[in-house]
């Protein structure tokens, strides 16, 4: 049996920040399809090259590319007991494909972060990512102690090109049209809980932990 935690939410909802905390707290492998694409892009691999034009435009990478990349990642030994999905699934076809590769005794818990559009744009516009570790900072909410340097590992912080305001607006529209229907999809399967994502990261984290406890998730 494996436990699959899924973080659902619009771009800027705080999925990445919470995923890092949850992965550490529950010793779960963090699988972020966005991070994987950025890694592949940096390495110039075929997954990265196929994804680039879509990522630059704030569009979704075609399902078959995402699914191949994900299969390669979750097939590795560190995902055997379960994993934490961040940024996947993003379409109904992806959710159905994930469902078909799980076995009946696998436990799926979907945590949906609720955040207003105004907050999403504010968060994305000051977001800074570390090139060396998974740390996410923010110019206003978590400013680096030393300009441009990651507080966690001393690596270089950078702004994602797709965090430019016009691309963020497109990504939010894509979320609304293609990903938001998954809230209903997982709700009907009775595996989804909505969590207020407007609060401070520590409070959101506690909210997520309560849901995981209530759902009786077996992470042993
Ligand atoms: P993220 O870091 O999750 O915001 O993802 C960055 C970009 O990678 C997205 O805007 C998409 O272009 C692409 N991407 C990441 N995950 C997926 C996915 N599950 N399906 C399609 N495209 C994705």
Image (cartoon, rainbow, N blue to C red):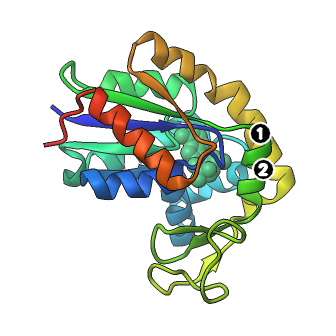
* Percent x, y of residue 82: 24, 41
Q: Is residue 186 left or right of residue 175?
A: left
Circles 2 and 1, Cβ within 8 Å, touching? The answer is yes
The secondary structure type at the circle numbered 2 is helix
Asked whether the viewer can see residue 68, the reply is no
* Percent x, y of residue 25: 29, 55
Looking at the image, the residue that sits furthest to the top is: 188
Which quadrant of the view contains residue 85? top left
- Which sits in the foreground, 69 or 119? 119
Residue placed under numbered mark 1 in the picture: 117
Mark 2 Cα within 10 Å, few/some/many (few <14, many 20+)? many
The secondary structure type at the circle numbered 1 is helix
Residue drawn at x 36%, y 44% as measured from the top left: 84
Disc 2 Cβ-to-ligand 1 distance below 8 Å: no
- Which sits in the foreground, 104 or 64? 104
- The CA distance from mark 2 to mark 1 is 6 Å
* Percent x, y of residue 20: 42, 58
Residue drawn at x 33%, y 54% as measured from the top left: 23
Above or below residue 160? Residue 91 is above
Q: Is residue 160 left or right of residue 117?
A: left
Above or below residue 216? Residue 148 is below
Residue placed under numbered mark 2 in the picture: 121
Residue drawn at x 71%, y 71% as measured from the top left: 139
Specify the quadrant that holds the N terminus: top left
Mark 1 Cα within 10 Å, few/some/many (few <14, many 20+)? some
């Amino acid at each position: 049996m494996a436990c699959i935690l899924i973080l659902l939410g619009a771009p800027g909802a705080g999925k990445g920040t919470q995923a890092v905390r949850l992965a550490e707290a529950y010793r779960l492998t963090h699988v972020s399809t966005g991070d994987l694409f950025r890694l592949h892009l940096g390495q110039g691999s075929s997954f990265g090259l196929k994804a680039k034009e879509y990522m630059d435009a704030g569009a979704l990478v075609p399902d078959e590319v995402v699914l191949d990349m994900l299969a390669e990642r979750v097939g590795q030994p560190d995902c055997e007991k379960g994993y934490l999905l961040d940024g996947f699934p993003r379409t109904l076809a992806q959710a159905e494909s994930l469902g078909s590769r799980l076995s009946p005794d696998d436990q799926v818990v979907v945590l949906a972060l609720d955040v207003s559009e105004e907050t999403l744009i504010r968060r994305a516009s000051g977001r800074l990512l570390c090139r060396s570790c998974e740390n996410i900072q923010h110019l206003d909410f978590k400013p680096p102690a030393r300009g441009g340097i990651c507080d966690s590992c001393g690596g270089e912080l950078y702004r994602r090109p797709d965090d430019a305001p016009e691309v963020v607006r497109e990504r939010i529209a894509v979320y609304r049209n293609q990903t938001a229907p998954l809230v209903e999809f997982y709700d009907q399967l009775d595996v989804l809980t909505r969590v207020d994502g407007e609060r401070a990261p520590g409070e959101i984290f506690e909210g997520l932990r309560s849901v995981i406890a209530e759902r009786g998730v077996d992470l042993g």
